[in-house]
Amino acid sequence: MHSLLNVKKDNEEIKIKGSKFMYGWIFLSLIGGIAACLFLITHGLKFDSKYSLFYLGGGIMCMPFFVYITLWHLPALIPGKILLTIVQGETGTIKSKKGSVLIKNIRNINLIRNPLNLINDIVIETFDNKKMKIRTYNLIDDLDYEVIVDKYMYPYMTENARKVWDRKVNLEKLQRVAKYVRQERKID
């Protein structure tokens, strides 16, 4: 199964955390990038190769990028960090550090990459024209995001919001790759 979701169910609350695999992947890539830059700079400063200036230049040029991205990702490396909490039900809500929103009030929901820090944010637009951004720190991949929305939020969305979501989600791909099948909504 593809899903790397780290979901903790606590009564009606569903707490979404980043997957351990993604924690490791982000940690290794950020630390590896900084270590590679330091390696290039130190070997470039030795001037024992005709490529020393390339090593030095490459290390100096890439180091600010890796330090910048690492600083943005530091909050993600807190163990046990809860990215969002979903309370299911007819009066269900989505809670994060930034606040909460009723699931019935969701007009549109997207996973958008911030071009400044390269971090994916879940952006929720509501019927009262408010936006809430939930930073994922890239700990939730695209397929897991789609499973979260489809499994835990979709049944409680309004009919119009479900139609918008149905145009975005590829259920065949979710079934083929993530082994996820949408359960039919229970009508009371």
Image (tube, rainbow, N blue to C red):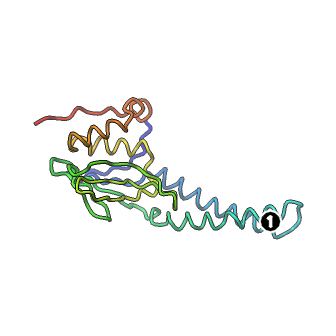
Q: Is residue 117 left or right of residue 31?
A: left
Q: For the residue carrying disc 1, how many other residues have a C-alpha within 10 Å: few (<14), some (14-19), or many (20+)?
A: some
Q: Position of residue 86 (x, y in %)?
A: 26, 52
Nearer to me, 13 or 185 = 185
Q: Secondary structure at mark 1?
A: helix
> Split into 4 quadrants, where in the image is the N terminus?
top left
> Split into 4 quadrants, where in the image is the C terminus?
top left
Q: Position of residue 148 (x, y in %)?
A: 33, 45
Residue drawn at 55 percent across, 65 percent down: 70
The residue indicated by pointer 1 is 43
Q: Is residue 121 left or right of residue 27?
A: left
Q: Is residue 11 visible?
A: no
Q: Position of residue 160 (x, y in %)?
A: 23, 41
The picture quadrant where one finds residue 31 is bottom right
Q: Position of residue 165 (x, y in %)?
A: 32, 40
Q: Is residue 172 visible?
A: yes
The amino acid type of the residue labelled 1 equals His
Residue drawn at 33 percent across, 32 percent down: 181
The picture quadrant where one finds residue 187 is top left
